[in-house]
Image (tube, helix red, strand yellow):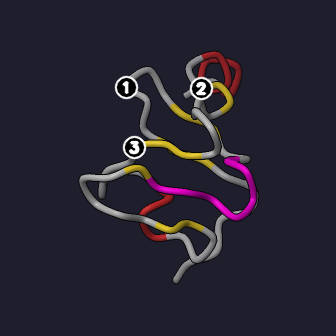
Amino acid sequence: MNANVVEADVWPVSHSGGEKSISDDDLCSECAHCSYRPGEMSGCEKNWPGLENNDYYVVSCQMFQEK
């Protein structure tokens, strides 16, 4: 896959008031910096530095740290 296409299909994470609804499909759900709360709004200690795709799933993050 062309790297330019991948970059065009992702953008900075959208969130409101520092919180975002994420699912277990998001990269964040497995990150040590995320206060993942299924069914509720979740938070990120690093202020959501990742990138999300067209389905609003976080798919990439330079600050990701596995739990």
Q: Which picture quadrant has residue 51?
A: top right
How far, Cα to Cα, is label 3 from label 1? 12 Å
Q: Give the answer, above or below, for where 50 lies relative to 6.
A: below
How far, Cα to Cα, is label 2 from label 1? 10 Å
Magenta residues span 42-48
Q: Type of residue at label 1? A: Asp
Q: Residue at x 56, y 19 (%)?
A: 9
Where is mark 1, residue-wise? 55
Q: Type of residue at label 3? A: Ser
In the picture, measured across the screen, residue 38 lies left or right of residue 44, that is: left
At label 1, counting other C-alpha atoms closer than 10 Å, the crowd grade (few under 14, some 14-19, many 20 or more) is few
Q: Quadrant of the N terminus?
A: top right
Q: Earlier in the sequence, mark 3 or mark 1?
A: 3
Q: Earlier in the sequence, mark 3 or mark 2?
A: 2
* Secondary structure of the residue carrying numbered label 1: loop
Q: Type of residue at label 2? A: Val
Where is mark 2, residue-wise? 10
Between tags 3 and 2, which lies in front? 3
* Secondary structure of the residue carrying numbered label 2: loop
